[in-house]
Structures are given as structure tokens and as C-alpha cells.
Image (cartoon, rainbow, N blue to C red):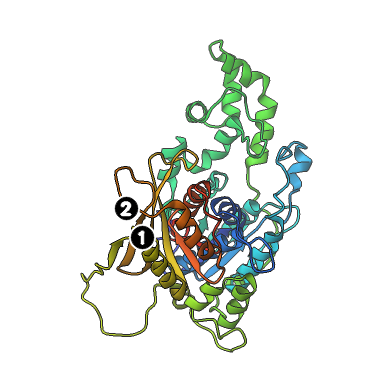
């Protein structure tokens, strides 16, 4: 488990710990990481599925005494009044993402985690405000995000956690990546701008040069004041010409830690998982196999609650029935097979159907780009120590399953909503498989997101 306590934290070890989760970041990361998925009524749920897995992982490993998922309330905020062009070039959200905005809030509620959002304010501003108030009260604060815009908030008592890499982000990491300390991130961002948010910055000034200037002259004001005396160059001219743009950019990227708190700090206390409530949510989304693995298939109307860690470990298949303890170094080996006949593949797929889940990996020919590589074979596992490899297009191998036969046999299982397909990098596998003629799979789990 990663230690979430920020370096040089002034908070005592037993101080309250506030975990602030960048919910909008989770949502968009999940949407772009996973291929399309839909629940039984046709509603898209790929972002919901990925969001649920990332939240489950976080709660399993890093629960604080207080926590909140923070969302953007809408596309427009006070920054649009400061600068009409702010985020104006962004296209509208895809149609398949729109219904998932509400569903991820339902997912947050199903896990008994407070959700926070406020009209006219960005999630980042709310995170800044909660972090400031909590730190002033002597609390420990962890911001779960890898967004560079939030790195300006890092200071003693306030740290960040990259949710995918499960690595802390502190002053050393900011310095290594951007060449400045966290408190100077705003100055650097003001110079380089941000094409994603349409923050103008100063043309011709990149991250490396911006860090050098800020470190030499102290801050943006110092850089702009020194510009007249710099040696003639395009960069000097750009600094002089775009000084007003740089100052505006600084106001756009600076987070407002004076934002109103939509909920009192003490209302964010962690609570136990309501199993029946979570079961109802999972069944509604069509995540049937997830509910089965968590032992929630019969709990939609039952009473009772369980600790988050226990339920979420079950969710990810980490909890087994009590039994004799195995030696610490015991491993599960054997039962591996090379499948070269369609009849044998059919038996493996039937075992996967009975299990309700199976692991699948596309073995590709070369480059990591899924649009350039070719499918060579399939690796399948139905339980620990029971796996097979299905060669499909290996040169020089006389006996292997024909691709058309593999598609005919595996295709229905990929589309079976009652069987979970587990990948490590589902996006890569799906693109390789669909290019080879296999249908898109649903539902999916991706250990690259939840490991």
C-alpha cells in the first residue's frame, strides 16, 4: 500500500485524513480507456464501469477518514467571464458519454462516498478550497489525480496520488517533471499556456524555457519586467508582445481556494458500504457477474452492511472461502495447454461460460500500436493455474485453429453479458481483436485500470 502522507507533513500521525478524488478526471480517463459497453437497455456504461473499478481500487487500498469525489458541475464557470475563449474550442461531449454523467454520480452514491460539485466553479477550485480548509485545521490531505493543474496545491500536509500508477506526487516529482517547485507551477503555466483549456500563454515559450525563466527571475512579473533587457530574440519579442496574455493566463490557471464549500468538511466522514444498495446499482447497470463475484446477487433487497475493504476485495476476486492456509511460497502451476483444434477450444470456452468470467489476452505480432500489429493468437485463463494458448496465425506451425473457427466459437461468448471478460489493457486487446474480425466484448474489466 502506498503511503499517502505528504512529505514533511505538519499534521500528527493520528490527524484526520481527507482524500479528495478528481471525479471528472476519473470519468474521462475511464471513458477513453475502455471500448464501448452497454447495459441491457442499451445505455452506454463503459465510463461507469471504468469509474467504478477505479473507485473500488482506491477505496480498497487508500481509504481516508474523510473523503469526497469532486465533479465539474457544468461546462461554464466564472473563468468564461474572465476570458470568453476559455475551453471554447472543446467539442461537445460524445453522445455515448452524456448519459454516463449522472450514472457515475449514482456509482459514487452506491459506494457511500460523498459527491461534491458547485455551479460556476470547477472541480479543481473545490479541491483547492477543501484542501486549504482541511490543512488549516491540521488535517492531512491527499488529492487523487495526476492533473498538472492541481500540482500547485502541493505543500506540507497536502500531497497527490497518481491513481493509475499508484505513486505519490510531491515536490520532488513536480521538480523532476516541470523543473520548478509546486508553488511556482502557476508562473510556468502562465507562460506556456494550455492548449487543452485554450489558455493562451506566450507563443514560443515551452515548458523547459518557462522553468528556466521563472527560476531565474522569480515569477511571471519578474520575467516580464526583465524582458526589455533580454538579448534580441523572437522569445524576447513574444514576451513583450504577449505580456497581457501571460497575466490573464496566470489568473486562468490559478486555482481559487476561496470557493464556497458545498458540504461542510465534517460531513465527508467515511461510512461503511451498504451492500444491498451497491447490489441494486450493479444489477441496474447490467454488471451481473460483478455482483456475483461480490456475493451480492441475492442482496438487492436485504439489509446489512459490510466494511468497504472486504466487499471490494471480493469484487476483484481477492477474497476466497475460508480454508487451510497455504504456505507463503505456494504457487499454482500446471493445467496449461496449447489449443490447436476447434473442439478443444470449444471445451475451454464452455468452462469460461460456466465460471462466469475469464481472462483474455490478444497476442500480437510486433509494435505496440494496435492499428499496426497483427493478431497471432489468444491466451485464455478460466481460473488460477488453468489457462491455454490458442495459436491462430503463427508461421511455420502446422496445426492451429483457423481464425474463422475461433471467431465463430469465441464471438458469442464475447457478446454474452453474463460473462465478464478480464483484460490487461482492454483497449489494446479490443482494437486488435476487432481488426481481426472478432466482435466487441462486453462487459469488460481492465487490470491496467484497477491493479
> Is residue 94 or residue 360 the one in the foreground?
360
List the residue tagged with mark 1.
341
Q: Residue at x 49, y 51 (%)?
A: 433
Q: Residue at x 63, y 35 (%)?
A: 195
Figure disc tally: 2
Whether residue 158 is visible: no
Q: Quadrant of the rendered structure where residue 359 is?
A: bottom left
Image quadrant occupied by the N terminus: bottom left
Within 10 Å of disc 1 (Cα), the crowding (few <14, some 14-19, many 20+) is some
Q: Quadrant of the rendered structure where residue 196 is?
A: top right
> Is residue 421 or residue 405 the one in the foreground?
405
Within 10 Å of disc 2 (Cα), the crowding (few <14, some 14-19, many 20+) is few
Q: Is residue 60 above or below residue 244?
A: below
Whether residue 303 is visible: yes
Secondary element at tag 1: loop
Image quadrant occupied by the C terminus: bottom left
| Residue 346, image x, y percentages | 42, 66
Determine contact: label 2, label 1, CB under 8 Å: yes
Marks 2 and 1, the one that precedes in the sequence: 1
From the viewer's perspective, tell me whether residue 392 is left or right of residue 325: right
Q: Quadrant of the rendered structure where residue 283 is?
A: bottom right
Secondary element at tag 2: loop
Separation of marks 2 and 1 at Cα, in angstroms: 8 Å
> Is residue 407 or residue 145 the one in the foreground?
407
| Residue 376, image x, y percentages | 39, 47
Residue 399 marker: 2
| Residue 78, image x, y percentages | 75, 47
From the viewer's perspective, tell me whether residue 404 is left or right of residue 246: left
From the viewer's perspective, tell me whether residue 127 is left or right of residue 393: right
| Residue 121, image x, y percentages | 71, 52
Q: Residue at x 51, y 52 (%)?
A: 430
Amino acid at each position: 500500500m502506498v503511503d499517502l502522507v505528504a512529505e514533511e507533513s505538519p499534521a500528527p500521525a493520528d490527524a484526520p485524513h481527507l482524500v479528495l478524488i478528481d471525479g471528472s478526471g476519473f470519468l474521462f480517463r475511464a471513458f477513453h480507456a475502455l471500448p464501448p459497453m452497454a447495459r441491457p437497455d442499451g445505455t452506454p456504461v463503459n465510463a461507469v464501469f471504468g469509474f467504478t473499478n477505479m473507485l473500488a481500487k482506491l477505496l480498497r487500498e487508500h481509504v481516508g477518514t474523510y473523503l469526497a469525489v469532486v465533479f465539474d458541475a457544468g461546462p461554464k464557470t466564472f473563468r468564461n467571464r474572465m476570458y470568453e475563449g476559455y475551453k471554447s474550442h472543446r467539442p461537445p461531449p460524445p453522445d455515448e458519454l452524456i448519459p454516463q454523467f449522472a450514472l457515475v454520480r449514482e456509482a459514487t452514491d452506491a459506494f457511500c462516498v460523498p459527491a461534491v460539485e458547485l455551479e460556476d466553479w470547477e472541480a479543481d477550485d473545490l479541491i483547492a478550497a477543501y484542501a486549504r480548509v482541511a490543512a488549516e485545521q491540521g488535517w492531512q490531505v491527499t488529492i487523487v489525480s495526476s492533473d498538472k493543474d492541481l500540482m500547485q496545491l502541493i505543500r506540507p500536509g497536502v500531497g497527490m496520488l497518481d491513481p493509475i500508477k499508484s505513486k505519490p506526487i510531491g515536490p520532488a516529482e513536480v521538480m523532476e517533471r516541470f523543473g520548478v517547485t509546486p508553488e511556482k507551477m502557476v508562473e510556468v503555466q502562465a507562460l506556456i499556456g494550455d492548449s487543452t483549456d485554450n489558455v493562451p500563454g506566450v507563443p514560443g515559450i515551452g515548458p523547459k524555457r518557462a522553468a528556466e525563466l521563472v527560476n531565474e527571475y522569480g515569477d511571471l512579473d519578474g520575467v516580464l519586467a526583465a524582458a526589455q533587457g533580454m538579448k534580441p530574440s523572437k522569445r524576447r519579442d513574444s514576451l513583450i508582445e504577449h505580456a497581457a496574455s501571460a497575466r490573464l493566463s496566470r489568473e486562468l490557471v490559478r486555482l481559487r481556494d476561496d470557493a464556497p464549500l458545498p458540504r461542510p468538511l465534517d460531513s465527508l466522514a467515511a461510512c461503511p458500504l451498504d451492500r444491498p444498495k451497491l447490489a441494486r446499482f450493479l444489477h441496474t447497470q447490467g454488471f451481473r457477474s460483478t455482483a456475483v463475484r461480490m456475493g451480492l446477487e441475492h442482496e438487492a433487497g436485504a439489509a446489512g452492511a459490510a466494511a468497504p475493504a472486504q466487499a471490494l476485495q471480493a469484487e476483484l476476486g481477492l477474497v476466497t472461502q475460508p480454508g487451510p492456509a497455504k504456505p507463503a511460497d505456494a504457487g499454482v502451476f500446471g493445467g496449461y495447454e496449447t489449443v490447436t483444434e476447434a473442439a478443444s477450444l470449444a471445451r475451454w470456452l464452455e468452462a469460461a461460460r460456466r465460471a462466469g468470467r475469464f481472462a483474455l489476452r490478444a497476442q500480437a505480432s510486433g509494435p505496440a500500436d494496435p492499428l499496426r500489429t497483427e493478431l497471432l493468437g489468444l491466451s485464455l485463463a478460466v481460473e488460477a493455474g488453468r489457462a491455454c494458448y490458442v495459436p491462430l496465425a503463427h508461421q511455420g506451425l502446422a496445426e492451429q485453429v483457423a481464425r474463422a473457427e475461433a471467431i465463430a466459437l469465441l464471438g458469442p461468448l464475447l457478446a454474452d453479458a453474463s460473462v465478464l471478460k478480464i483484460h490487461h489493457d482492454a483497449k489494446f486487446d479490443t482494437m486488435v481483436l476487432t481488426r481481426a474480425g472478432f466482435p466487441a466484448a462486453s462487459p469488460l474489466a481492465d487490470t491496467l485500470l484497477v491493479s
